[in-house]
Image (tube, rainbow, N blue to C red):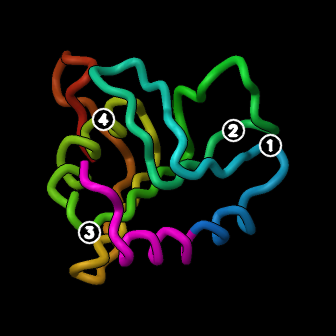
């Protein structure tokens, strides 16, 4: 992936504090930190809200309540492959901020496609 551009950085910065204000206590907002989904790849979402009181240095979360990707050059990947990964992992809500189209794309209620554990969609 190419380095993030200015529009991506500004959009991510603008939305970073919103989840922190909404989630507290037993939840942690992780910014550009990996998720260990145990699938064909382990993504590094721009923002993920995980059920975790504090950071543990012994494990990486394997799921999230909410994942947000900020997309400028990676919209095809974010709406396609990454959506499938997050759905297969059972993440209940996945959002893509498409900064070029100025849209927020909301995916909810992941569902499996057949018997393949890695084939799922929103």
Above or below: residue 79 compared with residue 115: below
In primary-sequence order, the first of circles 3 and 2 is 2
Do the CB atoms of the residues marked 3 and 4 lie less than 8 Å apart?
no
Could you say where residue 77 lies in the image, as x and y percent from the top left?
19, 50
**Residue 4 falls in image quadrant:** bottom left
Q: CA distance from mark 3 to mark 4?
A: 19 Å
Q: Residue at x 25, y 39 (%)?
A: 84
- Between disc 3 and disc 1, the foreground one is 3
Could you say where residue 119 lies in the image, as x and y percent from the top left?
20, 28
The residue positioned farthest toward the right in the image shown: 25
Do the CB atoms of the residues marked 1 and 4 lie less than 8 Å apart?
no
Q: CA distance from mark 3 to mark 2?
A: 28 Å
Above or below: residue 54 compared with residue 104: above
Above or below: residue 28 compared with residue 14: above
In primary-sequence order, the first of circles 3 and 1 is 1
Disc 1 marks which residue? 26
Reply yes or no: does residue 72 show up in magenta.
no
Disc 3 marks which residue? 72
Do the CB atoms of the residues marked 3 and 2 lie less than 8 Å apart?
no
In primary-sequence order, the first of circles 1 and 4 is 1
Q: Which residues are magenta?
A: 1-15
Disc 2 marks which residue? 51
Disc 4 marks which residue? 85
Reply yes or no: does residue 5 show up in magenta.
yes
Left or right of residue 77, residue 8 in this image: right
């Amino acid at each position: 992936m190419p380095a993030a551009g200015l529009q991506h950085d500004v959009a991510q910065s603008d939305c970073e504090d919103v989840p922190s204000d909404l989630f507290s206590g037993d939840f942690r907002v992780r910014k550009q930190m990996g998720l260990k989904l145990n699938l064909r790849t382990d993504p590094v979402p721009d923002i993920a809200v995980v059920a975790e009181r504090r950071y543990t240095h012994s494990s990486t979360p394997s799921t999230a309540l909410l994942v947000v990707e900020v997309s400028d050059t990676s919209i095809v990947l974010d709406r396609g492959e990454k959506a499938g990964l997050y759905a297969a992992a059972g993440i209940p809500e996945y959002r893509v901020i498409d900064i070029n189209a100025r849209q927020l794309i909301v995916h909810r209620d992941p569902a499996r496609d057949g018997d393949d554990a890695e084939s799922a969609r929103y």
